[in-house]
Amino acid sequence: MGRETGRSAVDATLTFLGAAGEVTGSAFLVEVPQARFLVD
């Protein structure tokens, strides 16, 4: 008898964009099979 956690594995890609390694002006692109979104 297993215990359900309500969680599942997700294939996701996280890409760092901008600012040549600096904090100011940087952003992250998050990609999953259903969507892409940018975190500024």
Image (cartoon, helix red, strand yellow):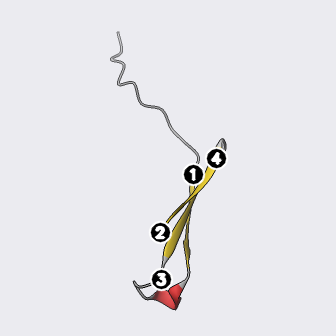
Q: Mark 4 points at which residue?
A: 35
In the image, what residue type sits under mark 1?
Ala
Q: Are marks 2 and 4 in contact (CB under 8 Å)?
A: no
Mark 2 or 4: in front is: 2
Query: What residue do we see at 51% from left, 87% from top?
Result: 19
Query: What residue do we see at 35% from left, 9% from top?
Result: 1
Q: Are marks 1 and 4 in contact (CB under 8 Å)?
A: no
Marks 3/2: CA–CA distance = 8 Å
Q: Do the residues labelled 3 and 2 touch (CB within 8 Å)?
A: no
Question: Residue 40, percent across and down?
Answer: 47, 69
Marks 2/4: CA–CA distance = 16 Å
Question: Residue 11, percent across and down?
Answer: 59, 46
Most distant residue in the right direction: 33
In the image, what residue type sits under mark 2?
Asp
Assess disc 1: are there few (<14), some (14-19) or many (≥20) residues with their C-alpha within 10 Å of its C-alpha: few
The quadrant where residue 22 appears: bottom left
First reached walking from the N terminus: tag 1 or tag 4 = 1
Q: Name the residue under label 2.
A: 40
Question: Residue 7, percent across and down?
Answer: 42, 30
First reached walking from the N terminus: tag 3 or tag 2 = 3
Mark 1 or 4: in front is: 4
Assess disc 4: are there few (<14), some (14-19) or many (≥20) residues with their C-alpha within 10 Å of its C-alpha: few
Q: Name the residue under label 1.
A: 12
Query: Vertically, is 19 above or below 16?
Result: below
Q: Do the residues labelled 2 and 1 touch (CB within 8 Å)?
A: no
Query: Vertically, is 3 above or below 19?
Result: above
Whether residue 26 sits left or right of residue 29 in the image: it is: left
Assess disc 2: are there few (<14), some (14-19) or many (≥20) residues with their C-alpha within 10 Å of its C-alpha: few
Query: Vertically, is 14 above or below 7?
Result: below
Most distant residue in the top direction: 1
Q: Name the residue under label 3.
A: 25
In the image, what residue type sits under mark 4?
Ala
